[in-house]
Image (cartoon, grey):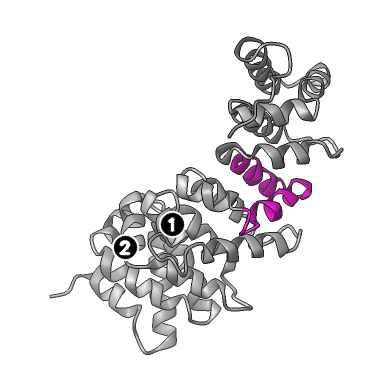
Amino acid sequence: MATELEELIGFLSAPSPPVKKAAVDIVRGLTGSEDGLQSLSNYASAVLLSLSRLLSEEKEVSEPAAEALVNLSQNAELAAKMVQMGMIKVAMDLLSKPGSSITRLLVMLLVNLTQLDDGISSLLQIGDEKMQGLYIMKLVRSFCRSSESSDDPFDHVGSILVNISKKEEGRKMLLDPKRGLLKQIVRQFDSSSSLRKKGIYSEEDTSKMPLELGSALSIEREPVKDPAIRVQALEAIYLIALQEAGLRAFWSVNGPRILQLGYEDEEDPKVMEAYEQIGSLIVHGSGTEEPSTTATK
């Protein structure tokens, strides 16, 4: 005899819209608690498949289904199972359709799934030479073209870029001049969205993009009021300056002097500590003079 939970999952595929709606609302509620997540994980394959099929339904059904999947994907084991069953392709196919009412939730789902190496590989389409990088190009294009409104559904794409840049293949793809992704991404330095800036600074951090960072730093901008963003920007500069090419770019825009002036005006202790970390690197790691440029053959 089927358990109550098995019956509930079965109702997710019910032909009756009201029954289906009621079932998905209950499942969404269960994903909001640890006990509910644990119970659903015992029927992972069935519930994930049923929820994924609901994503293409009308908003009243697709939205709670997407919210449930976002909650479930915070569990590493369930996220891994989603990747295995092709959830990234499902999400990207839906994102390609104009007018989707669950775009933000789908992007948040991708953020969670790309916490995993397999999720990153799936999004990068590693192993498919003809399609490799297509998903990332679509996401970056949407990220850079979307509005600056407070409810921009593509804001969280910056977090996806952070995730994929942790993998070498992801960094190479972002840095590939033929794709032109980096040029599009760097423009988000001027975004009014704190969420976008945090994603871009972190993405610069992990990808180590010295030349473009140098160009970005050479442009005068309005001061950033959020201390967290200033810390992330300084951490990005620190990691980039660890690289020889990054250090040359740092000096080329008079980086030490810029940081000195910023440090003198800074009052936040954490931001000051980030300044001091870079200062220590410059003084003790590379000397106090601009490094010489050597030609490579």
What residue would you read off at disc 2?
A: 84
Quadrant, the N terminus:
bottom left
- Asked whether 219 or 27 is in front, the reply is 219
Residue at 53% x, 58% y: name it: 108
Mark 2 vs mark 1: give the one in front: 2
**Magenta-drawn stretch, dominant element (helix, strand or loop):** helix
> Which residue matches tag 1?
71
Q: Which percent across, then down, holds residue 183?
A: 70, 52
Q: Residue at x 60, y 40 (%)?
A: 202
Residue placed at 27% from the left, 63% from the top?
Answer: 44
Q: Position of residue 3 (x, y in %)?
A: 19, 70
Percent x, y of residue 67? 48, 64
Position of 167 relative to 254 (above/below): below
Q: What type is the residue that disc 1 sits on? A: Asn
72 is higher (above) or lower (below) than 212: below
- Please tell me how crowded label 1 is: few (under 14), some (14-19), or many (20+) other residues with Cα within 10 Å: many
Q: Closer to the N terminus: mark 2 or mark 1?
A: 1
Q: Is residue 210 magenta?
A: no
Which region shows up in magenta? 177-204
Count of numbered marks = 2
Asked if residue 200 lies in the magenta stretch, the reply is yes
What secondary structure is found at the residue carrying circle 2?
Answer: helix
Q: What residue do we see at 64% from left, 56% from top?
A: 181
Helix, strand or loop for disc 1: helix
Type of amino acid at the residue the image marks with label 2 = Gln
Closer to us: 240 or 34: 240
